[in-house]
Structure formats: structure tokens, C-alpha cells
Image: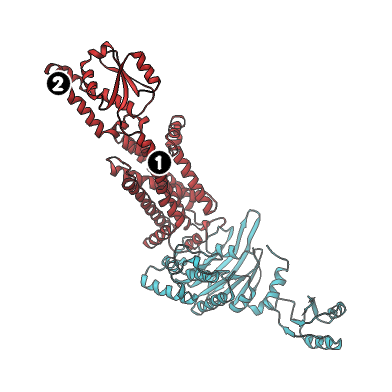
Chain colours: A red, B cyan
Amino acid sequence: MLHNLKYTLKTLFRTRALIFWTFAFPIILGLFFNMAFSNIESDEQMKIFEIAIVDNQEYRENIIYKNVLDNLNGEVFDAKYVSEEEAKNLLEERQIYGYLYFEDDTPEIYVRKSGIYQTILKFIVEEVEQRKSIFSNVALKEGYNFNNVAADIMAKLDSDVLSLNNKSNSNLSYTVIEFYTLIAMAAMYGGTIGLSAITTSLANMGEVGKRSSITPTKKSVMVISKTLASYIVALCGIAILMLFLYFVLHVDFGDKILYVILLAMVGTLAGNALGILVASLFKCSYDAKIGIIIAITMFLSVLSGMMGITLKYVVDTNLPFVNMINPCNMITDGFYALYYYTTLNRFWFDIVSLLLFTMLCLTISSISIRREKYDSI
Amino acid sequence: MKNIVEVKNLTKEYKNLKAIDNLSFEIRKGEILGLLGPNGSGKSTTINSILSLLKTSSGSIKIFGSEMTPSSYDIKKKIGVVFQEVAVFNELTVYENIDYFCGLYIEDKKLRSKYIDDAIALVGLENFKKFYPKQLSGGLLRRLNIACGIAHKPELIFLDEPTVAVDPQSRNNILEGIKKLRDNGATICYTTHYMEEVEILCDRVIILDKGKILASGTIDELKQLTNIEEKVTIEVDNLSDKIVSEIVEFKNVDTISYNGSALVITYKKGKNNLTEIVDYLNSKKVKYDKIFSERPTLNDVFLELTGKELRD
């Protein structure tokens, strides 16, 4: 087993094409993503943004909001105090990101589209709403310093820009999404490694396979050691990619790094299993099989949002079954779950889905390759 | 002599083709058995069937007295195979390739190291240990292919056309190596369509065609199967059609062919044929360069048995 493992590792690490596609290609793609999306990201950097507040009776009488918004004005946003009609026009002409309209104690937020500033506006309203009971009971009676509330909100804005993004899917960072799908794609590229390793142990897949099949080493030992070796190589690839993303491109994986690593490991296992499935099911040349696995990987990556998040949502909405069985989507979804959810339920669901997918692939593969005699070779 | 391999009534059918048709033969301990046949005659299919790589339609195969199955690991330990196509890893060096395949048989590292050195010496790759397969010539690659198949010192070796497309020096090296293996006690099954290799190497020969055994025996026994007893070749230019047609009428002549520079006459019987033709040519004042007589070769037997038409 160890002898086989050692030489399979040597063989895989020395296969230049394989190393390029699994090690270098995702990094190159990551660099391109970084260059392509850095402009979009910089556009999304925090700046003082324009809003309007409908200056009506209700607003003027709302002491809490009036104080907090006055304190934030000029610090977080530039507010124009206008009539409802003017606010509508400003929004229509895109001169403001949104406006607040007071009809009762809680203002209505009007926006044209979703975005980071619209979310910040919503966040401010939510923060004030949370403190309302305190204000009503204590603050108004004891002269509460509303400057503190505004300062508190600004501090939160400074430290929690990411969590602000979390409040709405439409505000996901483009770069982070692309890097999730990139990691998913790299994990699935582990399939090419699994495919290459397994090919050399099957008699109907080439001369080396034939030679291996007539040795006294059991096929199960051969297949398991080669699968293990291919998994180790694939893990190295994914580890290098993640280190590169984290340390060089400064991609933020959040604070649940152990879960991120677990997801990457399970995703890579699923990728390997898919490669082994392709190797065992398709009766064609090695090169054709490599073409098939790369095509499948790219297709699954696109469906899971690599070429734009829109397609992922279109598939999720119209063909949910497709992404439910798409391992690439399970990986990206797992990352989203870690990033956007406070609970881990969805993350574990994705992990279990990936493990089930892996088991299914390996079961079908083992049924296919367990025969030891062939009709033709 | 003890039989190492016993094949009985072996048949392998594809959809509309019998690749092997009721084949029965044995390989005896210590011999080199030549499986001789044109392309597509069923040589490789026979070996793959014996090795339990292919499903067979009927028949039985025993190796070392036991039935051969895919899980006959004790039998497999004693077998070495050199396939027709080179079966090595391009990413491993010469030494690593031999070590890898040898390691699938021999776990003891010390013993394996000695076996690898022996195999490298046998095929003459001492100066290429750290070379990768892509850096080797066709002949050296074939030698590596052989070393990978025999490094574990198997008792039974199958060599499937190991000298295809190699230069004469490498071929000579390979043939010498195979003789050494036999001299060291290995039993060898050697498939080829090169007659001269069979004549140099094999103790017994089986001639296969269309999956059937056409003939078997020692080389001398096979040569007796042919109708030809003597072949006379005369190097002569500008021989007239009239003279050629007169020679055809000679007693004992079986066939005659003339290509403008050499006249080849085969005889059914072999007494005084050379004297007769020399006397005739002298009487006709025909000048010739060389004239020589030889016994029929294995090639003559092979062509007579399998036919002279070209095969795919």
C-alpha cells in the first residue's frame, strides 16, 4: 500500500499538465478575478452617500430619529430635507440612494435598487428601532445623549461593513462570490487527479493498467492507495490556492476558518470521487476522459455561479434539483452558509450532501471496476 | 518434462469473430516456447486469456498445476509479463519504474534493490538509471519495458513481441537477455512474427493463424512439414524467359521465381539438384555470380502454412 502510495504521489506530482490545471490554473484565474473585480470592489468602498428625508410633520415630531439622523448627517450620509415629491424625483434621477418617509414612528425606506448604501440606511433604521424601547422609557425622561447612539451606529458601521453586506444577498461582494466558486472549481479539478491515478490500475485503460493487473497486488489495494494519493495531491492544490487567496489576495474567509478548511477537504473528496466515476464509467481514451471531466467541472462551476451569480439564482429558482445534485454548488453554498448565516445548519447540510455525493460516485465506480476480467482490452 | 502451463480447448469469441478457436497446448518447464503467427492471428489474445485478463468463452487454463483466475495471487507472484506496447510511467525514471513494478511483487527493499540492479544489468541500462522514458530511444525503451516485466525474477515469463521496432543492437541485446533468463531457469513464452528470432531462441514453436494452431513442434520438426526439401538461389542477370521455362521442367522442381537478378528454385526432393542446374547453366553459357543451396527455413514453413497473401 505504502509503496503504491509513494509512487503514485511521485507520478502525480510530476505530471506537469495535471499540476498546471490543479495548482497553477486556479491561482492564475484567481489573479484575473482579483484584477477584474478590484474596480467593482473599490466602487463599493464606504463613502458619504446622498439620501433624502421627507421633511414633514411626523419627522419633525420624531425626536429620536431626528436626533440620531442629525448626528449621522455629514458623517455617514448627506441628507437633503425635502418634500415627498422632491424626494421621489431625486430618487428617480438617481441623485440619492434612497429616502426616508415618516408616516408614523417608524420611517419607510424607499430605494430604487439594492446596494451597500441602501443596506446601511436600512441598518440605521433597524439600530434605532432596537433602541426605541430604551429611549422611550429612559432616554426621553433622563435626557439621553443621542450623540452616543449615532456614535454607536458609526462604530458598528466601521467594524461591521462585512456583516452589513450579510443582511442582503444582493449586496454580496462580487470578489468573494467569485473566489468561492473558484475554490469549488479547484476542488472539482481534483477529479482529473483521481481519474489519472485510477486509470493506471485498470487493465482496460492502458498498458500500465494491464501490467498492474497481472501483479499479485490486489486491485482493492491498488485502487485505494491511488485514490488516497490523488486526494493528497488534490488537497495540496486546494491548500496552496487558499493560502494564496488569503495571504496574497487577502480574501476574507470570515472567522470560521476550520469550517472553511473542512468544506474544502470534503469538496475535494467529492471532486476526486467524480473523477473516479468518470474514469470507471466512460469507455474512451484517457485524453477523452480528461476532456470530459474538465467539461463537467466547468459546466458545474458555471451553474454554481462562477460566470456570474445571476445564473446560480436562475438555476436555484427554476431548476432547484440541478443545483441540489451539483457538487460545485454544494461547495459554494457551504461557503455562503458560513459567511452569511449565524447558524451552521445549512453548512452541515452541504457537507452531508457532498459526502452523500462522494459515496454515490464511489459506490457506482466500485461496482463498475470490481470486475477483474474484461471482454476486450 | 513438467508442464508449467496447460491450456485446454480455449476459445475466445467476440461478436462475429473467433479470436481463439479451441486452442490446446502446454508450456514445459525450462523451455522457450515460440508463439508464431501473422498479425491478428490470436497471439496476444491467447496470452491475455492465459493471464486471466480476458473473459474466455470456454476452455481451461492451469498454471503451475492450479487453475488461473484473476485472484490467483500466488501464481501471479511467479509470473512476469512484457507486453507488446511499452507499459511504463513517463513521470518515473528508469530506476523508479523498475522499482515500482518490482515492488508490487517483492516487499523486501534490500532484495528488491539487488533484483533491480540485476535487471538493469541484464538489459544493459546501467548508464540510464536516472533517465526518464521520454529521454530514451525506442530500443532503450523496449529494454526498460522488459526490465519492468522481469525484475522480480519470475519463474514463468510471457514476452509479447518485445522486439517490435527496435534497432539491431537492441534486438541482439534483448535476445541475449532472454537466453540468459532461460539459462537461469525461467520458462518463457515468446510471441513474435520474426522467424529469425524464433530460430535463434525457441525450443518449440506453435504456429497460430486465425486463432487456430496450424502446426507445433521443434524447429526441425516444423521444417519437415514443408514440401520443400532444398532451395537453390542463383544470382544471375538477364536470364531469358526460355531458359527459365526450361528449368521449370527439371525433375523435382516445385516452384521457380526470377526477379531479374536472382533465380530461386525450390525442390521437392534434394539429390543432385545443384549439380544439375550448374551443368545446365554452363551448357547454356550463362554467366552467374553466386550460387548456393540451403535447406528450407522456418519462414518457408510459415508462409506455406499461413499463405503468402498480405495481412492487415
Tag 1 and tag 2, C-beta contact below 8 Å: no
Q: Residue most toward the top?
A: A57
In the picture of the structure, the residue carrying the numbered disc 2 is A144
The quarter of the image holding the C terminus of chain B is bottom right
Determine whether A199 is above or below A342 in the image.
below
Whether residue A182 is visible to the viewer of this picture, yes or no, is yes
The percent coordinates of residue A290 (x first, y second) are 50, 51
The quarter of the image holding the N terminus of chain B is bottom right
The percent coordinates of residue B304 (x first, y second) are 72, 72
Please give the chain letter of the residue carrying mark 2: A
Q: Residue most toward the right?
A: B242
The percent coordinates of residue B227 (x first, y second) are 75, 77
Q: Residues within 10 Å of mark 1 (few under 14, many from 20)?
A: many
Badge 2 marks a residue whose secondary structure is loop
Q: Nearer the viewer, mark 1 or mark 2?
A: 2
Three-letter code, disc 1: Thr
Question: In the drawing, what numbered circle is on residue B185?
Answer: none
A121 and B128: which is toward the camera: A121
In the picture of the structure, the residue carrying the numbered disc 1 is A181
